[in-house]
Image (cartoon, coloured by chain):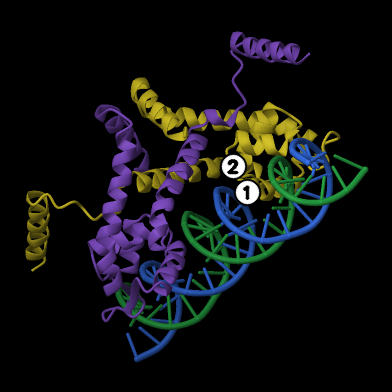
Chain colours: A purple, B yellow, C blue, D green
Amino acid sequence: MENTHQKIELLMRCIKALTNETSRNPSKYVCYKLSRVMRKVHRYYEGSLSQYGITPSQFYVLSAVWEKDGLKFKELAKSLEMDGSTLTSILDRLERLDLVERRNDPEDRRSLLVFLTEQAKQQISEMAHLAEKLDQEIKERFTEEEFATFERVLEKLSLD
Amino acid sequence: MENTHQKIELLMRCIKALTNETSRNPSKYVCYKLSRVMRKVHRYYEGSLSQYGITPSQFYVLSAVWEKDGLKFKELAKSLEMDGSTLTSILDRLERLDLVERRNDPEDRRSLLVFLTEQAKQQISEMAHLAEKLDQEIKERFTEEEFATFERVLEKLSLD
DNA sequence: CCCCAATTGTTTGTGTACCAATAAATTGAT
DNA sequence: ATCAATTTATTGGTACACAAACAATTGGGG
């Protein structure tokens, strides 16, 4: 009986293939594949970065401020292509962790400047080193050309 | 003066390149690239699916139930590789939209079975058709081989 | 100089996403 | 048959992500 069920399943799959009926499984959609992989890779980074008490998104923000200390809130959001309200909440947490500091912009009272704290400056390069190692471990699983194509497609998709 | 500033920027980039100092910009990390592209593609789907009043994630759940109507909650979560608590909240919304129905499993009182409503059955193939069109528009931007490599890498990353 | 439109960052509300803790039901070992 | 361990779905808590509404500020046209 169990065997019969399996045969029926197989037959159904054959019928679908022969009639060219498209699968209903969501795993065929690009968007679904992307989100599944993104979540997986995100958790992979998260597992390592948690030793510093931060999340991947918080790490990206720290890196961007590290690249240009004291940049404007607006510039930061733009460079991360991140919604302002999302950045506000991430900065709230980073400020609570004493890793980042908001200061008033002397030239425009609407604007904020974002700085790393001393503590963050001491830790960030170690964090970055860790993240590079994680990246390396991912890349090792593919040929250089394969991964280059992958990144090129990602790059092209990220330009609107 | 502005010109001087640009020259300094350029010089700094040269120094970084010559000393092999790695960039601090987060856009070099695989995880960041993935999340940026995922968000972009997600918004792209969202814009179209919103005409049905649903989100991409809700669409994936509907598709999976469409593929196998009346499957167990647990199976559904597993096939979507989704945390159970996430699925609970998505099913709550889909039930409120009258697109999905939870029923008790007669064979195990801990378990739930998930069904599409009549309304959902009438709409889902149109939604799927739309999603396929969106996918097609993305794929058109690349050569077949290029995109095949991209999907192969995604596939491999989603395992383990 | 004044007013109105645009800009800046925050708040609020909704929707994922996941972990830990929970309650209910089932299973298995004795 | 009974009790402990396991399984199942939900709840509660935290963290993104984004749109819309908001307050403070700036800037330009009259």
Judged from this view, the residue extending furthest toward the top is A18
- Find residue B5 and report its image quarter: bottom left
- Find residue C4 and report its image quarter: bottom left
Q: Is residue B115 left or right of residue B62?
A: right
Q: Nearer the viewer, residue B112 or D29?
A: B112
Point out the image quarter for the C terminus of chain A: top left
The kind of secondary structure element at disc 1 is helix
Residue B140 seen: no
- Find residue A13 and report its image quarter: top right
Q: In the rendered image of this protein, does residue B28 appear above or below residue B153? A: below
Q: Nearer the viewer, residue A97 or B96?
A: A97
Q: Name the residue type under label 2.
A: Met
Residue drawn at x 60%, y 22% as measured from the top left: A23
Q: Nearer the viewer, residue B101 or B54?
A: B101
Mark 1 sits on what residue?
B86
Residue B64 seen: yes
Circles 2 and 1, Cβ within 8 Å, touching? The answer is: yes
Q: Is residue D14 left or right of residue A111?
A: right
What is the chain letter for disc 1?
B
Residue B6 picture location, percent across and down: 11, 60
Residue drawn at x 67%, y 36% as measured from the top left: B76
Using a 10 Å C-alpha cutoff, classify the residue at mark 2 as few (fewer than 14 neighbours), some (14 to 19) or many (20 or more): some
Residue B137 picture location, percent across and down: 45, 30
Mark 2 sits on what residue?
B82
Residue A82 picture location, percent across and down: 40, 57
Residue C22 picture location, percent across and down: 73, 60
Q: Is residue B123 left or right of residue B16?
A: right
Q: Name the residue type under label 1.
A: Thr
Point out the image quarter for the N terminus of chain A: top right
Residue drawn at x 52%, y 40% as measured from the top left: B45
